[in-house]
Image (cartoon, grey):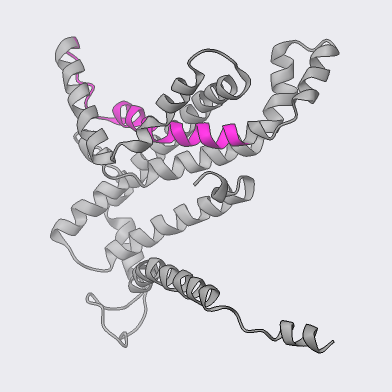
């Protein structure tokens, strides 16, 4: 009895204390900038001071009235929505082939689909810009700027994540249900729509949301490919910082943080992010 009581009162080992302290320090370093941005969006002063003079919502009103932020937000929404839709369609098809198929070169195809993750975005943006310029010179059509080029570029970033998310969902699926449906006379399209697709649903939703987030907050790749009169929200924020330094930028950044955080929470409810990140 006394031994059990002593074991229950045993202090944690120094290694566990060190690991716990390291986790707390890392979390503090990661969250402090985010908390400071959100806090500075509400202070009633152009310059950050402590204690603050007061709190206000006027910086959010100023952000809404700034045309570049609104236009950038709309363009980012359009590009992210199109990219997420195409990424899910292509990613679902690729995942079905990679998980269910058996053919020579499957490993090479899987590596090729995931290869954009290995290239820095700034390098990928430069290469794509040079590629679009070369295509424009050959065809005589300007394809280097605008939403189509942004969508094509963002697909390179989102497609690998779509494949990983949907493949992780397919691997845990029960193929015996599909075989039973086929044995009962269902054609392949009915099997896919009635059996396979419901099994992929959580992975498809998570892939769509994750793709939307990646496209919506991308800066490095978009910087090379925006056209005249069209800019994304991250680029509009960067351009605003060149000539202004006030909490308006914190206000629009807070909106962006809330959108991305909300989508990440929803994504984690369908597929645990720890499985694919």
Residue in the image at 33% along x and 73% along y: 40
- Spot occupied by residue 264 in the image (x, y as percentages of width and height): 52, 51
Does 259 appear above or below 197? below
Residue in the image at 21% along x and 36% along y: 224
Q: Is residue 226 visible?
A: no
Q: Please tell me whether the stretch drawn in magenta is mainly helix, strand or loop.
A: helix
Residue in the image at 63% along x and 35% along y: 169
Q: Is residue 155 visible?
A: yes
- Spot occupied by residue 268 in the image (x, y as percentages of width and height): 58, 50
**In this orientation, which residue lies closer to the viewer: 90 or 66?**
90
Q: Quadrant of the N terminus?
A: bottom right
Quarter-of-image position of residue 63? bottom left
Residue in the image at 20% along x and 56% along y: 240
- Spot occupied by residue 7 in the image (x, y as percentages of width and height): 72, 82
Q: Is residue 158 magenta?
A: yes
**In this orientation, which residue lies closer to the viewer: 64 or 254?**
254
Does 156 appear above or below 3? above
Stretch in magenta: 139-168
Total labels drawn: 0
- Spot occupied by residue 71 in the image (x, y as percentages of width and height): 30, 44
Q: Is residue 277 magenta?
A: no
Does 3 appear above or below 254? below
- Farthest residue in the front direction? 3
Describe residue 247's horizontal placement relative to residue 107 as left or right.
left
Describe residue 225's horizontal placement relative to residue 109 as left or right.
left
């Amino acid at each position: 009895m006394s031994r059990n009581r002593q074991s229950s009162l045993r202090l944690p080992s120094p290694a566990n204390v060190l690991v716990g302290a390291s986790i707390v320090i890392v979390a503090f370093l990661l969250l402090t900038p985010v908390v400071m941005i959100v806090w500075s969006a509400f202070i009633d002063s152009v310059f950050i001071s402590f204690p603050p003079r007061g709190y206000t919502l006027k910086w959010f009103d100023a952000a809404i009235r700034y045309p570049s932020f609104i236009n950038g937000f709309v363009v980012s929404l359009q590009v992210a929505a199109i990219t997420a839709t195409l990424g899910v369609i292509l990613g679902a098809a690729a995942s079905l082939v990679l998980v269910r198929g058996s053919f020579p070169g499957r490993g090479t195809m899987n590596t090729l689909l995931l290869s954009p993750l290995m290239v820095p975005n700034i390098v990928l943006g430069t290469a794509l810009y040079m590629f679009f310029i070369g295509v424009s010179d050959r065809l005589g059509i300007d394809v280097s700027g605008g939403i189509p080029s942004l969508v094509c570029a963002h697909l390179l970033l989102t497609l690998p994540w779509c494949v990983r998310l949907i493949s992780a969902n397919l691997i845990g699926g029960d193929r015996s249900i599909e075989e039973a449906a086929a044995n009962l006379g269902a054609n392949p399209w009915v099997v896919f729509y009635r059996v396979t697709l419901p099994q992929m649903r959580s992975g498809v939703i998570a892939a769509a949301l994750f793709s939307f987030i990646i496209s919506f907050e991308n800066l490095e790749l978009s910087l090379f490919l925006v056209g005249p009169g069209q800019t994304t929200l991250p680029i509009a924020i960067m351009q605003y910082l060149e000539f202004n330094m006030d909490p308006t930028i914190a206000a629009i950044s807070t909106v962006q943080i809330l959108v991305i955080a909300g989508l990440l929470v929803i994504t984690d409810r369908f597929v645990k992010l720890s499985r694919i990140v």
